[in-house]
Image (cartoon, grey):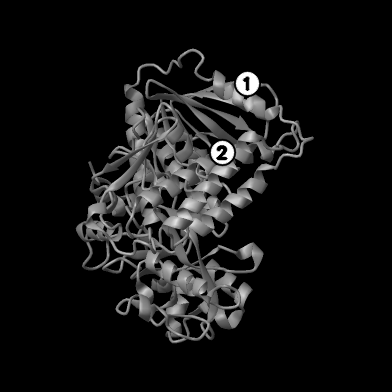
Amino acid sequence: MQDCIEKVDTDVLVIGSGGAGALAALRVSDNGVKVLVVTKENIRVGGATVMAAGGISIPYGEGDSPEIFYNDILRGGEHLNDPRLARILAEGARHSFIDLENYGVVLDRAAPESYRILIHSEGHTIRRAYMDRREGLGVCQAIGRAMIQRRIEFLPETIITRLLVAENTVFGAVGYCFSTGKILVITAKTVILSTGGIGQLYDMTTNGKSLTGDGIYLGYEAGADLMEMEMVQFLPLTFPYPAGFRGIIIGMSSLFGPGVRLLNRMGERFMERYDPERKEFVTRDLAARANYMEIMSGRGTVNNAIWVDPTRNEKEIMEQLKASLPHVFRMIEKVFGPEAANWEKPFEAAPAQHFFMGGLRIDTCGETSVKNLFAVGECSAGVHGANRLSGNALTEIYVFGSHVGLKAAERTKDVKSRTTPDGLSDEAIADLQEHGRCSSQCSLPRPHEIIAKLKQVMEKCMGPVRDGKALERGAGQIRELRDVYNEGVCLLPPDSLYNLDIVRSFELRSMLILADLMIKAASIRKESRGSHFRSDFPDKDREWQKNIILRRGHDGEVKIQLGVPGQ
């Protein structure tokens, strides 16, 4: 790493360039406020949004309404949601989706019905999942072009390592651009965290490589409250093999027709045991848990998977879904063959970590408990409660991306000065410089070796099924890994550009802290609710209809608070 320090000045700093961050930046720019987007990636709009499929939930079908949608959101989240945030999501969904056209997104307004369909997704009481053949990728491409047209400043291949905070107010951030080797000191009136979830804490995940929980860690270290850290969602159906496909999204049962059945290796339709009424069309938390339990009980296939059998459906349904989800069917054909892709024989699938309901606690403006620090998208908490309904991830991005961008722009206009207190960035700069001086001639472990061990710990103790003993064991193993990390890691090579070992080292620091906090929250919640299932406390307890809030104390210890949703 070079000792070159570059100072950058902006009004609004957006950290992360998924769909929520990009839309927030566009809204800020449209309000005449200077904005800078910083991301670890090398594309303007990426994150999990670029891989999103499965539709967006919009209450515009016959018999639907924002009120019905709102009640579904609360019911799906087991009433741990902040009802104020759920209301914003439900009432803003329709307008926010249509508003995408202002950024060049072409909606299927006049397309054949086969290209634009509504399906009845799991957890919803009515058909409202809009399926668009362009999926998240098409939206990302369009809003990326809109960012270029508005000349929004963009810094790719840069990891933010610390927020600059004094007297509980954010003043900017410090980061490392690994394509230039420069240390960046960024001053800003407001900061928006939009770094996505924590998928890379798991070995089997649908998430991309950049989703390591950076924003959640940055906010926590800055003093912001975290909430719902125990609530990890698993997708029931992902590719179990080959290695390059493991964890890639297949989806939910509803994407494979009303006649789909999930079978174990003995050919039993096992969902009849877990939910005799809804069977395959339960919410994704229960579906993933059932698949996991079948596999762990020895009733899975030789590939540690279950069978998805869509052969009892009408082919007309398949053609509609193929038009809306072409890439899913192409991958099924590539891995399992044309017969599986044409619903002529079953194919294998396994659950994987998919979404994180936990993160930074926000108010109705998207502001955290640190002044002028906002959070949006998957790194924020409160919208989904204990379980996110199918299709609501993109809805959240479209609604809150624009909403939080507007609120941050308004706040920025009220901030009279962005003067950073003297010496506020010194410690963060020294931390980066120390990483740059690490020697490669050492016997210490490299960051990726510790990350691999962390993933295995999280799979075992924080999967779809948990228990107190496993959580206690996992907490001890995470402490051991933190001790190893604190003793030092080997970074290779120390002098070159694109030093991803330095990036991985900072990511690992975030991941170890977040893993500990997630296990702590899961240990505290002694009940089963939504995506959090404890085999030693299998029932839901009304006394636990409370949010677990974690914050970092001045002494570095974790402070725990129980809160009433929405208060």
Relative vertical location of residue 497 with respect to residue 52 in this rendering, above or below: above
The percent position of residue 517, horizontal first and vertical second, equals 44, 44
Residue drawn at (20%, 57%), measured in percent from left and top?
67
Q: Circle 2: is it few (<14), some (14-19), or many (20+) Cα within 10 Å?
A: some
Q: Circle 1: is it few (<14), some (14-19), or many (20+) Cα within 10 Å?
A: few
Residue 40 can be seen in this image: no
Q: Quadrant of the N terminus?
A: top right
Residue drawn at (48%, 85%), measured in percent from left and top?
311
The percent position of residue 433, horizontal first and vertical second, equals 65, 24
Residue 70 can be seen in this image: yes
> Real-space Cα distance between discs 2 and 1?
23 Å
Residue, disc 2:
509
Closer-to-camera residue (313/380)? 380
Q: Quadrant of the C terminus?
A: top left
Residue drawn at (22%, 57%), measured in percent from left and top?
542
The percent position of residue 113, horizontal first and vertical second, equals 38, 72
Q: Secondary structure at mark 2?
A: helix
Closer-to-camera residue (294/89)? 294
Closer-to-camera residue (344/2)? 2
The furthest residue to the top = 422
Relative vertical location of residue 369 with respect to residue 84 in this rendering, above or below: above
* Type of amino acid at the residue the image marks with label 1: Ile
Of pointers 2 and 1, the one earlier in the residue sequence: 1
- Which dot, 2 or 1, sits closer to the camera? 2
The furthest residue to the right = 441
Q: Which mark is residue 5?
A: 1
**The image quarter in which residue 435 lies:** top right
The percent position of residue 292, horizontal first and vertical second, equals 48, 69
- Total number of numbered discs in the rendering: 2
* Type of amino acid at the residue the image marks with label 2: Arg
